[in-house]
Image: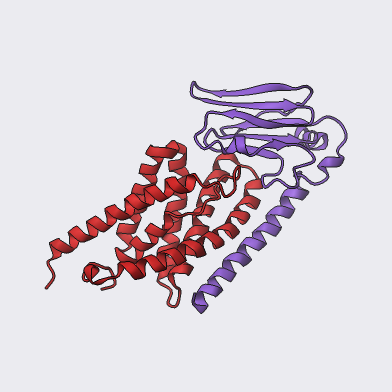
Amino acid sequence: MANPNRMDTKRLALSSLLLSIALVLGFVESLIPIAPGIPGIKLGLSNVTLLIALYMLGNVNAFALMGLKVMLSGLLFGGVSAMMYGLAGGVLSMLGMISVRKIKGVSVIGVSVVGAVLHNVGQVGLAMLIVKLDQLLYYMAILMLVGVGTGILTGTAAMYAMRSLKGPWAKGMLKDD
Amino acid sequence: MKKRDIWLLLSVVGAACILLLTAGRAWKTGGGTDGMGTAEGPLYMRVTVGGVTFDPFVLEEEKDFSIQQGETMLNIVSLSPEGFHMAYSTCNNQDCVLQGEVTPENMRARLLGNAVVCLPNQVVVELLRPEEVAGDMEG
């Protein structure tokens, strides 16, 4: 029988590793200007780590990871404003991903797309509440379409990463075991 | 990708397209960019700071317009009779500075139309035609 303490340590180590990777990816993608001047258009690379956390460590761990990622990247790079928008997008995105994951026949790519789209919807929704500008609704629609593309990309990356991660070393630790 | 994924993607794309069409139409018929290039008379600029909208004013000459909030937040808008651009901002992401110039000619091509938005500082600057300003005053 597997030692539960040993499993907790492995889960903690994986959570910490995913958080570090999420922070680095978040910083790296801020250096890649895919649409300069258009706020909110990003590849969403750190969503790969949240997807891995969701599938391998469960809902609670993934939610905690998202909260910590938003808080730390806000403190390190973006400031209070980025933290606020990140949290609005992150919470909506996680709730959407958790709900869609329960639907049978939806793969990690589908879950990722819903997460990416809702992340953009959450951020622009908060911006609409704050600045009350009609154009932002139009902008939200554009970001939803962008989210479909970036969601497919990050979902595919997460799928391949999880295939590699689900080795014998992870036995007993994963949520689905 | 599974069959249900494709249905999910199509649903999201469909919802986005409906939003794109309805929001785009409402915005352009409700005083957005439509017909801006044919407007006669001077252009106006309207500033909203922290949800408070100030009266529009005419763009008459080239000058810098500062929006100072407290000691740490500052936006400088560079004005001319043809339009404006955000020249400087204390915000972290500098998205507002990168949004470029707003003129009657380029507004149709801009994603945010007649506006430059600085979300961290909660500043919105809009370019308006005389009819829109008259509508605002009557409203």
Question: Position of B8 compared to B115: left or right?
Answer: left
Q: Quadrant of residue A50?
A: bottom left
Viewer-side residue, B47 vs B4: B4
Give x and y (percent) for residue B27: 72, 49
Residue A102: give x, y in percent of width and height.
40, 71
At horizontal 88% and vertical 35% (from top left) the residue drawn is: B40
Left or right, B107 with reference to B92: right
Q: Quadrant of the C terminus of chain B?
A: top right
The purple-coloured chain is labelled B
Residue at image coords 68%, 32%: B85
**Residue A83, percent from left and from top:** 43, 42
- Residue at the (31%, 59%) spot, across then down: A60
Image coordinates of residue A81 in percent, x first then y, are: 47, 38
User: Residue at horizontal 45%, vertical 62%?
Assistant: A96
Visible in this render: residue A87?
no
Total marks shown come to 0
Where is A88 relative to B88, above or below?
below
Letter of the chain shown red in the rendering: A
Question: Residue B118 falls in which quadrant of the image?
Answer: top right
- Viewer-proximal residue, A90 or B137? A90
Name the image colouring: by chain
Q: Quadrant of residue B38?
A: top right
Visible residue check, residue A53: yes
